[in-house]
Amino acid sequence: MNDYPELPKGLPGSLGQAVFRLIRERGLAGRSETDALDSEWKAVVGAEVGRRSTARKIKDGILEVAVTNSAVLQELRGFLHETVLQQMQQRLPNSGIRGIRYIRVR
C-alpha cells in the first residue's frame, strides 16, 4: 500500500503522484474545497449576507463562518440560523454538518 490518496483518472502513476503531492504541498487542493464550500454558503444566504460572510471549513461537524459585519452576525445567529443550517445540510449531505459557528472578523 502507498501513502497517496486515489489519483484523478488519466494521470500516470508516478507522475500523477508527484503532481498530486505538489498540489497538496502548495495548499492548492484544500483551496478548491474551501472555495466550493463558500460558494454553497453564498448560494444559501444570498448576495447581501454572502458579501459580508465567508464559509471557511467544516471541523468535527461544525461549519465555521467568518462574518465582517455585526448586523449580519446578529441576523445569522438570530432568525436565519436554523434555515441556513438546514439548507447547508441538504446541499452538502455528505459533509456531516451538525452546526454553525460564526466568528466576527474585521
Image (cartoon, grey):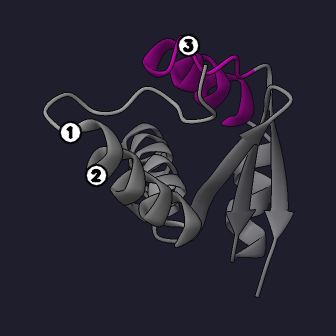
Tell me the kind of residue under disc 1.
Pro
Mark 2 secondary-structure assignment: helix
Q: Which residue is mark 3?
A: 94
**Spot occupied by residue 40 in the image (x, y as percentages of width and height):** 42, 40
Numbered tag placed on residue 64 in the rendering: none
Q: Which residue is mark 2?
A: 15
The residue range painted magenta reads: 80-97
**Spot occupied by residue 30 in the image (x, y as percentages of width and height):** 54, 54
Rounded to the nearest angstrom, the CA distance separating label 2 from label 3 is 30 Å
Disc 2, disc 1: CB below 8 Å? yes
Q: Which residue is mark 1?
A: 12
Rounded to the nearest angstrom, the CA distance separating label 3 from label 1 is 29 Å
Work out which residue is located at the far left of the displayed protein and give it: 10
- The one nearer the camera, 66 or 17, is 17
Q: Is residue 33 left or right of residue 80?
A: left
Screen quadrant of the N terminus: top right
Sequence-first tag of 3 and 1: 1
- The one nearer the camera, 97 or 75, is 97
- The one nearer the camera, 105 or 25, is 25
Residue 64 sits above or below residue 71 on the image? above
The residue shown at (34%, 58%) is: 19
Tell me the kind of residue under disc 3.
Asn
Q: Is residue 47 left or right of residue 69?
A: left
From the image, give the main secondary structure of the stretch colored magenta. Answer: helix
Tell me the kind of residue under disc 2.
Leu
Look at the image and say whether residue 90 sits in the magenta stretch.
yes
Dividing the picture into quarters, in which one does residue 47 lie?
bottom left
**Spot occupied by residue 74 in the image (x, y as percentages of width and height):** 80, 56
